[in-house]
Amino acid sequence: MSRKVCIVVTARPSYSRIRSTMLALRELPGVELQVVLAASSLLDVYGNVAEFIMKDGFQVNARVYSVVDGQSRLTSAKTTGLGLIELATVFDNLKPDLVVTIADRFETMSTAVAAAYMHIPLAHIQGGEITGSIDEKVRHSITKLADTHYVSTDQARDYVIRMGEPSERVFKTGCPSIDIAADVLKSPELTVDVFEKYGGVGHILDIASGFVVLMQHPVTNESDTARKQMDASLEAVRRLGIPVLCFWPNLDAGSDGISRAIRIFREKGLDENFHFFKNIAGNDFLRLLLKSRCIVGNSSVAIRECSFLGVPAVNVGTRQQGREHGPNVLHADYYADEIHAAVSKQLAHGHYESCHLYGDGHAGPRIAKLLGEVPLETAKKLNY
Amino acid sequence: MSRKVCIVVTARPSYSRIRSTMLALRELPGVELQVVLAASSLLDVYGNVAEFIMKDGFQVNARVYSVVDGQSRLTSAKTTGLGLIELATVFDNLKPDLVVTIADRFETMSTAVAAAYMHIPLAHIQGGEITGSIDEKVRHSITKLADTHYVSTDQARDYVIRMGEPSERVFKTGCPSIDIAADVLKSPELTVDVFEKYGGVGHILDIASGFVVLMQHPVTNESDTARKQMDASLEAVRRLGIPVLCFWPNLDAGSDGISRAIRIFREKGLDENFHFFKNIAGNDFLRLLLKSRCIVGNSSVAIRECSFLGVPAVNVGTRQQGREHGPNVLHADYYADEIHAAVSKQLAHGHYESCHLYGDGHAGPRIAKLLGEVPLETAKKLNY
Amino acid sequence: MSRKVCIVVTARPSYSRIRSTMLALRELPGVELQVVLAASSLLDVYGNVAEFIMKDGFQVNARVYSVVDGQSRLTSAKTTGLGLIELATVFDNLKPDLVVTIADRFETMSTAVAAAYMHIPLAHIQGGEITGSIDEKVRHSITKLADTHYVSTDQARDYVIRMGEPSERVFKTGCPSIDIAADVLKSPELTVDVFEKYGGVGHILDIASGFVVLMQHPVTNESDTARKQMDASLEAVRRLGIPVLCFWPNLDAGSDGISRAIRIFREKGLDENFHFFKNIAGNDFLRLLLKSRCIVGNSSVAIRECSFLGVPAVNVGTRQQGREHGPNVLHADYYADEIHAAVSKQLAHGHYESCHLYGDGHAGPRIAKLLGEVPLETAKKLNY
Amino acid sequence: MSRKVCIVVTARPSYSRIRSTMLALRELPGVELQVVLAASSLLDVYGNVAEFIMKDGFQVNARVYSVVDGQSRLTSAKTTGLGLIELATVFDNLKPDLVVTIADRFETMSTAVAAAYMHIPLAHIQGGEITGSIDEKVRHSITKLADTHYVSTDQARDYVIRMGEPSERVFKTGCPSIDIAADVLKSPELTVDVFEKYGGVGHILDIASGFVVLMQHPVTNESDTARKQMDASLEAVRRLGIPVLCFWPNLDAGSDGISRAIRIFREKGLDENFHFFKNIAGNDFLRLLLKSRCIVGNSSVAIRECSFLGVPAVNVGTRQQGREHGPNVLHADYYADEIHAAVSKQLAHGHYESCHLYGDGHAGPRIAKLLGEVPLETAKKLNY
């Protein structure tokens, strides 16, 4: 009998990360892949993942609309509760042998609790890392619910074991998001006109002679100031006087603040050198990054994928605080001056050597193989 | 301004454990106590806590009926999801400065996730212990969501710190359930006729010359066999030929199995020496235990309170596996013979010396004082 | 392409009523039958329908555990809300062309609202009748959400049309519950020993020389007095001095009161002539009724099926108030004396002629045929 | 003891309609007003009602974030289910003697079911009218759950009674939304610069010499074509060559389609004479209408308030189909040419006489007085 491995995708960036694992799982004999889409992965405004996933030839086994509108801390909790109720029913129907959850978005707690309570072995990808915000609590809390762990770095593995997980169930596989980066390095040419293909709003820019990318998510711990934080970043990159490709934020407490900052920036007519995108398919996005002179903001892409790609990055604020990073990253606080100075330094430096801190580009197949083999156990005690 | 401390009670035994803390909090200047009742604490069939809590003079700020019927793993998850949705709304209304969650029942995850996601500091009582079943995952997962920890033993404190919690936020206070035990030791006389006061079903027994107590909960990991496990225990104590006071189980996956075992045992007319209770108020229950010759089953009461009271205990099966215990405990597997042998040994031995492993009887005031003082912070990183 | 007809069953008695329709639908070319089990149909304590349904060879397409525990008005509302959330997801997955809902239990509102809001044509069986309690509101409210109506009597058809439904969409089919009664009349012998087959609790009675059946549900409008109402009925039939087969109530606000009345009646040792059943399969139950000298309580079975079977009935209280009935029914208020007098009168009278008020025994095939043909429209306006 | 009257507001336009009733209720001796905000009334993007309501000096007793994101038929059902769960808890806490629900938006079913199931008398405002779309089913379904009815017109009263409601519980009060219109007629001057006060996007227009208003909501029955419908209306008013004030739609299945139509219209640069508003306070909005030369779209405002104000209206499509209207309304199908022709005709005609079909401007106090007096009964039967 096949081992039914169920992957729950709850957001656009989660799909990018898990894609190489899914492609490898599909080829693995003895494994039946189940795909569940939930939360913001189904919402148009955040980039409907369903289209990308079906273009890749995967079948979707269940869809769970679980986002409670309001984009606040309150609705984060309610979204997680609604997802938990419905994912329990989904698991009861699909009867997976193994459930896979990715990283640390707030709503992934639904997947983890449902699987753990229903005694379905839970595999957690990207545990053991350190960041700021509520993600930190979510990530480690899920580690304590998970049965097997697929981590990106040596330090992450060490930390998961120190939290009491048995070492034989903690695998350093590298981060699967690096796999896409590695593919992109092999065929780095951006063959599409992103303005034409992805629409968005704002001016059509000449990006041939260089540009920067701005991608900033709300920091949940500071949602009220999310707009001011974005103001600073917009102002900093505006001063550079070169084209800026700016991306809409994830669904999170505070994303409304970011969106408002962008709207007002545009209303004021400050967006002469700016174009705003909602979503760009993983590969195109990385090729775009590879062509860019610097990525600014607080996306983990700047730290993970860009360390591998060698793209200079300016990490703004606390969201990625404490996360391991390669030589390509400079930090700046939420001040336009400080951000501007850091970006200027990166523009002067230019691209970096590829760094393998977060993986070598083969994480997906490695994780898939393990998912096909790991013992299907749910009993666990603190390993002290 | 007062510090609003919100205690969420989700079950009968949780109220017993938190009661001394609540009594002390009520007297603490600068603290406003908020009480929320949720899950099985509101259900008659499991012993409606609301009555006891109001007899103690506490006001209930909100009631959340969240138990999804079915008593399975599936409905455990759904109950937790529904509780999460509604507790989020409750916290939004009550605006507590600090939320307190107790121990490790599955539905306490609702409290923990709601508080953590809404950036309300979370205090967790009785973390760091080791047991069997899903409780183990719940307990440690909540540790990673909580901001301050109030543990029972030195080992528990050590384990919470090893999981990455900052040592200055982990307090060894002793277990608050020992507080009631200490009160009971001061006035040990059982002044009520339990058959008259608490009703129940079965024969009215002459317990003056000694009896045993049977209290067995389903083990979630083995819900399907819950009935057989109970069969073994019932048979073992029946053979003793002395009076048995037997208690109905908690609401959990498998409690139906236990109830069925009891029903069939009665239908078969094997219950000559048995009386069955739904619930007995904390103090009366401990006085009853103090008079008993042995407690049999898998309740944590046998390990915590009875170590302090010196009541001989036979712990059956895996539910309390790995938990620290005093000299009063013998273990037995789910076989009538094995259980019977262990109980016989305990009857021969008689009562033990009081052991302070789980506390000295002053945990409640200690915890209350800390809850009134601890910094109200929610930012946290792995302390490695 | 097949027309997908989705039947949502939410309780034990609903399945009995819809069974002949389902059997006929299964044979109908061009129709694909979908079966969804929700609410109390899945709960053991109320007689798990899943077993009967699968014994009949039907496949269950989805299971929705939606009962919020508490058996109060509050939890009735919450159960309906939870059912609505999950049935919406179920319909989104199953993509039925037509949804069928049965009668007027509170939680059937989940089915009706989900279908109506999702623009799936809704077929409603047993509308247009008049009874007491909240069922009255539920029934007519669903009529206004439904697109086609399958009613039992001429008066019911008239009433549905007077409420503004277009007459061409209101079909008098007879009540499908009469179909089982008609089958039973053809082979009326009870070939099983009900005590052996269905267990239950209480004394094994000699029923060969006559007995009465007691079946009383809580009246939602008077849930607080449900216990007293049951006390009166128990006392009334006890006085007869002949065997009584008594049935546990449905899941409703107040069922706890009924159960308590039964428990206390038994504790008091008044149950010498009583046996208590949880559930008996439809056919066996009707054969039992046919052998009985009278049915007492407030079940609609006494009015519908028993009018066809000619079984004398004493209808107690307001639950069936205003419902059309045949000559076999006498009414009594909630007083032991009054009930006792009415039952005595019926015992003296003996069985009645079969009455076809609620149908001729061919409703199921008639409804099935219509479900396969009716236009799949959801637009509707008051037809005034 | 005061009679606690609880008003549940679920959307921006519902507050406008109920405001005069609330103002009158506040002054009524023996009445305690409770206000609950739920669903889209709390969402910024649809015009957060909380601000307006608090500016009017009302206290909000509970907030229920219940909108499940997705804006589809599926999420309409889920939103209603989530609202039902939480409103039940709210009613359990607030213990209202009477619950008031307004009109026929899909999510008002949550209010109606929760109140009916909890045996709280339900007052329904604006029943008995006829329109297109799902609102039609919702409206009449709520009529069958409600205990008292406050309708706008003689025909509406007649229809509610014909549906089986007892005539002594059906009150013709006029529509409360006319009350605001009457106030506005008394002080018709628009004293604010709407562009300055309400922001919005698009060009700042010179509206002194005349303009039209475009307000179009998605028609739920035709959600997929919502965008095309809006395209036609946008094109029709664009051709007029005069200023257009256009409003964002309500939260409904299909509102995304309308928004997309607006976005693309703007991207194409067709919006030279357009300004787009999210929300304008009730009074300012009516004063603006009064100054306008015509209102185009499918808002009920065009039919109710504008009949009283005498503002020419072009009603597009099926949403208001069958609703009674005064002489100020012309109809057009979803074709730019047809809409353009009708608007041109209205521009030529100019303003109309005030028509009192929907009320005389004193509905609010009338309804309030009745709410303070009506018997608090929940038992009801078809009055045939």
Image (tube, coloured by chain):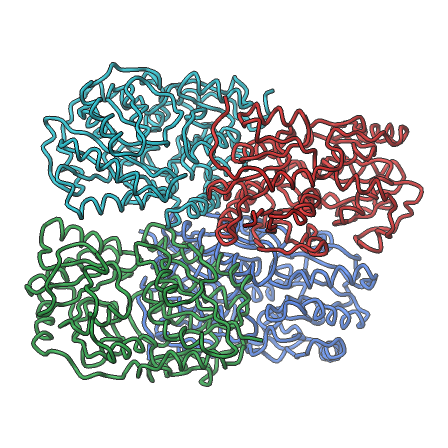
Chain colours: A red, B cyan, C green, D blue
Question: Where residue A253 sits in the image (x, y, percent)?
Answer: 62, 41
Give the percent coordinates (x, y) of residue B294: 21, 26
Residue C248 position by quadrant: bottom left
Q: C90 or D219: nearer the eye? A: C90
Count every numbered label the image shows and give the total. 0
Q: Is residue C241 left or right of residue B297?
A: left
* Horizontal arrangement in the rendering, residue C96 relative to residue D372 (left or right): right
Name the quadrant containing residue A109.
Answer: top right
Q: Nearer the viewer, residue C121 or A185?
A: A185
Name the residue located 11 percent from the left edge and 61 percent from the top edge: C205
C8 w.r.t. B169: above or below: below
Residue C236 at least partly seen = no
Percent across and percent down for residue B371 are 44, 24
Location of residue A136 in the rendering, given as x and y in whole percent from the top left corner = 60, 31
| Image quadrant in which you'd find residue D257 | bottom right
Relative to A130, is D189 above or below? below
Q: Residue furthest right?
A: A209
**Quadrant holding the C terminus of chain B:** top right
State the residue at coordinates (60%, 66%).
D185
Left or right placement of residue D347 versus residue A109 in this view: right
Residue D150 visible in the current orientation? yes
